[in-house]
Amino acid sequence: MMKKYIHILVCAAAVMGLGSCNMVQNAVTRVTGAAGTPKPKEEQPAAPAKNAEPKKSAQTKPSKQQPLQEIDEKQLAGEWVIVAVGDTRISDLEEMPYITFSDGAFYGSNGCNVLNGQYSVKGSKLGFSHVAATMRFCPDVPFEHEINVVLADGTSYPVKIENKGHETYLYLLSDNGNRRLLQARRHNMGFLNGEWRVTAIGNDEIDDEECNIFFDIAEGKVHGNTGCNYFNGEIFISPDRANAIELSNMGVTRMACPKTAQETAMLVALEQASQAVQKGDRQAALLDNHGEKLITLKRVDKND
């Protein structure tokens, strides 16, 4: 009996001790977290400062694409030299690729083969149809295929036409208008057409009604008089340079006269001419490749 009593007391003491240990352990767990590891304090979000402006998003609205202007047949008419297709620049070639527009039909060259077909203009878009091409093999013309892809049958592009000095640029654009698929350039040297009187050679003024030049840009021909002899030659307009003009294959008559110095100076200036610029409605000038004035011209009026 006594042993049983002692056993009951020991068990009771053990239960009380366990209970006491569990309560302490539970208290520690609530304060420090599991396994006695200190529990990090939960950070409270900082209160916004008074009068603080809300944070703006870093995203910006995309810029609006400027609407393209409508084009017409007159703006397209004529020959355009193709100077770029995609990211490929084209320059300084003996046979530059080109495209010519005339009354709903076009023809041209991709630098190797001849192209022709029809085109249509609707608003600011230019479409190509019934396109055909010759089938020569030209391994040395790497941009040929790229031009064929752009000027393909059934294609249509937004178009932008831009005037820069004596030149006009034609851009065929991607559908969103952000990328230039093809660039072509047309010279506007038509202002030179007709007869001009030479009023100065270099810095020396010329007072001689017989000293004149006649330009025919469409035919690529030039002729005139030095004040002593007649001359004639050919006009070449380089697609690689702005305002470019070159006079070559010049022929001159051989009549003797007292204006030899004037004639020599004029023929040398014509040979050195590299650019032509318009100076108002009735004046123009031929310049060298440094932009120095060689010959000053005044348009001959039939009423003069």
Image (cartoon, rainbow, N blue to C red):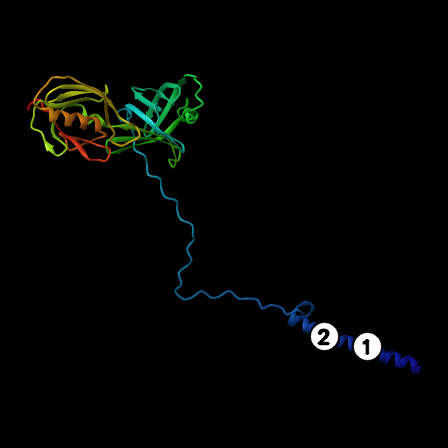
Q: Quadrant of residue 21?
A: bottom right
Q: Quadrant of residue 298?
A: top left
Residue 147 place in picture, x, y as percent: 40, 26
Q: Nearer the viewer, residue 61 or 285?
A: 285
Q: For the view shown, which residue lies furthest in the bottom direction?
A: 2
Q: Nearer the viewer, residue 79 or 124?
A: 79
Q: Is residue 47 left or right of residue 158?
A: right
Q: Is the residue 88 above or below the residue 95 in the image? A: below
**Precedes in sequence: disc 1 or disc 2:** 1
Camera sees residue 299: no
Q: Disc 2 designates what residue?
A: 23
Residue 80 place in picture, x, y as percent: 31, 25
Residue 266 place in picture, x, y as percent: 15, 26
Q: Is residue 174 left or right of residue 262?
A: right
Amino acid type shown at disc 2: Met
Q: Quadrant of residue 268?
A: top left
Q: Is the residue 56 above or below the residue 164 in the image? A: below
Of helix, strand and loop, which one carries label 2? helix
Of helix, strand and loop, which one carries label 1? helix
Q: Is residue 218 left or right of residue 14?
A: left
Amino acid type shown at disc 1: Ala
